[in-house]
Image: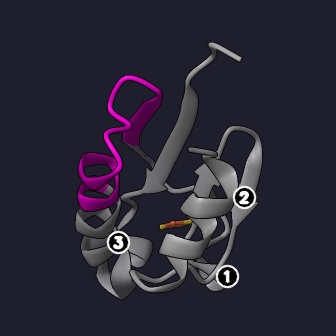
Amino acid sequence: MSEKTEIIICLGSSCFARGNKKTVQAIEAYIQEHDLSERVYFHGGHCFGNCENGPILKINNKFYERVDYISVIDILAREIED
Ligand code: FES
């Protein structure tokens, strides 16, 4: 498959304040360590309207709730095959 995996991290104020600030750094580090910059399109998004279940992360069309900088590593490993 040559399509890029799209990762959108919610940068709305609620998710950002509750951990996505740190999760951004964790995802950037993961992309770099695994040399994924060609295969992944990582960017921030506005509030997804689901703040109470945040912090929110979206990968392709799938939403992840209550993500933190530790659990995101397993999510990335599952979603992006080496
Ligand atoms: S701020 Fe992330 S869903 Fe609202």
Ligand 1 neighbours mark 1 (CB distance < 8 Å): yes
- The reply, left or right, for residue 76 in relation to residue 46 is right
**Residues at marks 1 and 3 touching, judged by CB atoms closer than 8 Å:** no
Nearer to me, 52 or 64: 64
Q: Compare marks 3 and 2 and give the one earlier in the sequence.
A: 3
User: Which quadrant holds residue 42?
Assistant: top left
At label 1, counting other C-alpha atoms closer than 10 Å, the crowd grade (few under 14, some 14-19, many 20 or more) is few
- The residue wearing badge 3 is 23
**Residues at marks 2 and 1 touching, judged by CB atoms closer than 8 Å:** no
Marks 3/2: CA distance? 15 Å
Secondary structure type for disc 3: helix
Q: Which residue in the rendered view is the most extreme toward the right?
A: 62
Tell me the residue at 44%/86% (across/down): 70
Circle 3: residue type:
Thr
Q: Which residues are magenta?
A: 28-43
Nearer to me, 33 or 17: 33
Circle 1: residue type:
Asn
Estimate the x, y position of residue 64 in percent, counting from the top left.
68, 67
Image quarter in which the N terminus is found? top right
Q: Is the residue 65 above or below the residue 68 in the image?
A: above
Label at residue 53: 1
Q: How many marks?
A: 3
At label 2, counting other C-alpha atoms closer than 10 Å, the crowd grade (few under 14, some 14-19, many 20 or more) is few
- The residue wearing badge 2 is 63
- Circle 2 or circle 1, nearest the eye: 2
